[in-house]
Amino acid sequence: MMCCLIGRWAGCAAAVALALAMAGPAQATVYTADNAPAAPTLEELPLKESVTQYGITWTFETPARVGQFVNGDYYVVGPVTVTAIDPKPRVGAEVGEDELDANEKGLREKVADRVRNGSMLNPSATQKVGWDSGVKNWFRRNVVTVPPVSMKPGDSLVSTISLKLDEGAVTPYVGHRNMPPLKRAKGDNSPVKTAAVLTCMAEPQPADAFRPGYCDTTNRVYLARHLKRQMLRTLPKPENAPKLETWVRVFQRPWVNLGFFGFDQPMENMPHYGQWVGQAQSMGGLMLMLDFTAEEKEPLLVNMVQVGIDYWSAVKNGHPGWEGWGGHGSGRKFPIVLAGVLLGDEQMASPTAQFPKVNFGEDNQTMYGDCWTGAKVCFAGHSGKHQNDIPRPQWGPYEHMQPKDWQNKGDRKNYQSEAYRRANSSSSWPGQALAIRLLGAEKQWNHDAFFDYVDRWMYENDKEFCQEINKYFPDKSLVDEGATWFHQGQAWEPFVTGMYLKHRPTLAAPTDGWKTGKP
């Protein structure tokens, strides 16, 4: 088990960058109340027989009026009927025996259950997806939509492209170690390559309209003119600041993420492993706080806010959340809070205040309490403490115990939670915590233990604690003394580490709240 974990850590190690970066800095019109665009007339929209995005083409029964949202996603003024989707959705016997992956051979006994390039009309937030029959856990054949698809205003059609056997997907967030493309049915990998969203609207939209969330059939439209950009900082760019256009691409395509463990995520749309999701949010959030021009920041800002709108649409419609589970579950709360704060939507800005039962990894895995190191805030374990009080006797809180008591506590052994704490969760959080503090949105986040825990991670000297831990693991040291990424005081990305250590002390909240805990 431990060697598998270490293999994953090594594959994710060090700072991150895109494999394919754009040629130069992207810029966009910054829409405000002073230059707010009017909605076009219906006749001003182009009349199209089909529309294509990210390799997916939707063809209409009769030519339809088509527009684009501020992030580039398409809408069609309806009602409209989609008569064909390319690549063609294939179901049942259309998927040959020679196309089945190892997961399907074990799970899909009925030929009728086979699916490739699946679509869904109005995806449910109940963790049921129809993208591909190779999706573990969340696939349901009865939610698959095939043409002809009748769309009325308020509908969202999400279409996908499946990975072929042995085809590799390059995630928009990869490590410096030239991580190889991710293939279907390998570990937790998704069989879904790409996804795109077509939305049906009742009328044309202004150029600064965000796409309604793909789980939101009310068609709630937010406008970029309302973004409170003045809340973003203009901190000096450090020498190791990543290229802005790199992160524009990370957030460009829809983050379709209704299941868990990455089983259903389109791998060329978004980071796959939860740790990478958290790291991406840390990077993007802090990039928005640098002294790029407003026009340079706008593409990244728009894309990140759209991700938040999508996640919020899922939470509002009953999604249970993205729970803490080792490295999984991180990075989903941040874009919701970011979008809500910047759009002035207080309900969106405080998702756990509105929906106390929804789970987010950062909150599940941090808690106040007496830690064996003397700190007053703890890592709550591999699976943490959930809002619906799911008991975690083997994967839950453990830092209240001395390391000598971590072994042989149930089938899963508590020390593995410490492994995940050090390698797959804590170091993906500092950028998120700092960005929220820079926005002054700690109250909206609604979980103080997260911020104090991140301060502990960054400021508690753990050298002696590491030596104590390793006394009890002589055969396989839990903390590798030669690997900096096993140790507190750093984020996975040097850029985030430098930003935190430079700017966190300038904020009003003390950096040692982890020593006293919550009153």
Image (spheres, helix red, strand yellow):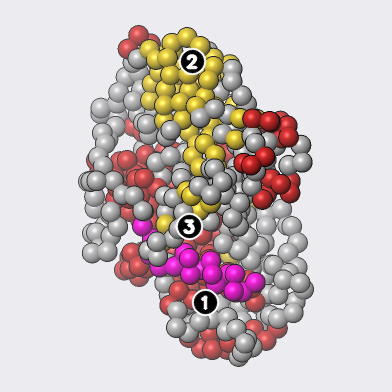
Of residues 229 and 307, the one nearer the viewer is 307
Dot 2 crowding, Cα within 10 Å, few <14, some 14–19, many 20+:
many
Which image quarter holds the N terminus?
bottom right
* CA distance separating discs 3 and 2: 37 Å
Tell me if residue 478 comes above or below residue 360 in the rendering.
Answer: below
Q: Which label's residue is closer to the chain start, 2 or 1?
A: 2
Q: Secondary structure at mark 3?
A: helix
Q: Is residue 70 left or right of residue 162?
A: left
At x 77%, y 41%, the residue is: 109
Distance from label 3 to label 1 (Cα)?
29 Å
For label 1, the crowd category at 10 Å Cα-Cα, with few meaning under 14, some 14 to 19 and many 20 or more, is some
Residue beneath disc 3? 276
Amino acid type of the residue that numbered disc 2 sits on in the rendered structure:
Phe
Q: Position of residue 441 (x, y in %)?
A: 44, 52
Q: Nearer the viewer, mark 2 or mark 1?
A: 2
> Circle 2 sits in a helix, a strand or a loop, which is it?
strand
Q: Would residue 413 be visible to someone looking at this image?
A: yes
Q: Main secondary structure of the magenta part?
A: helix
Residue drawn at 48 percent across, 57 percent down: 276
Q: Residue at (46%, 30%) from the top-left corner? A: 56
Q: What is the x, y in percent for residue 507?
A: 36, 64
Q: For numbered disc 1, what is the local secondary structure?
A: helix
- Residue 104 in percent (x, y) is at 69, 45
| Residue that label 1 marks | 515
Query: What kind of residue is marked 3?
Result: Trp
The tag on residue 60 is: 2
* Magenta residue span: 1-17
Where residue 424 appears, as percent x and y from the top left, is 53, 66
Mark 3 or 1, which is nearer the eye? 3
Q: Check disc 1 and give the amino acid type.
A: Lys
**Relative to 216, is 330 above or below?**
below
Mark nearer the viewer, 3 or 2: 2
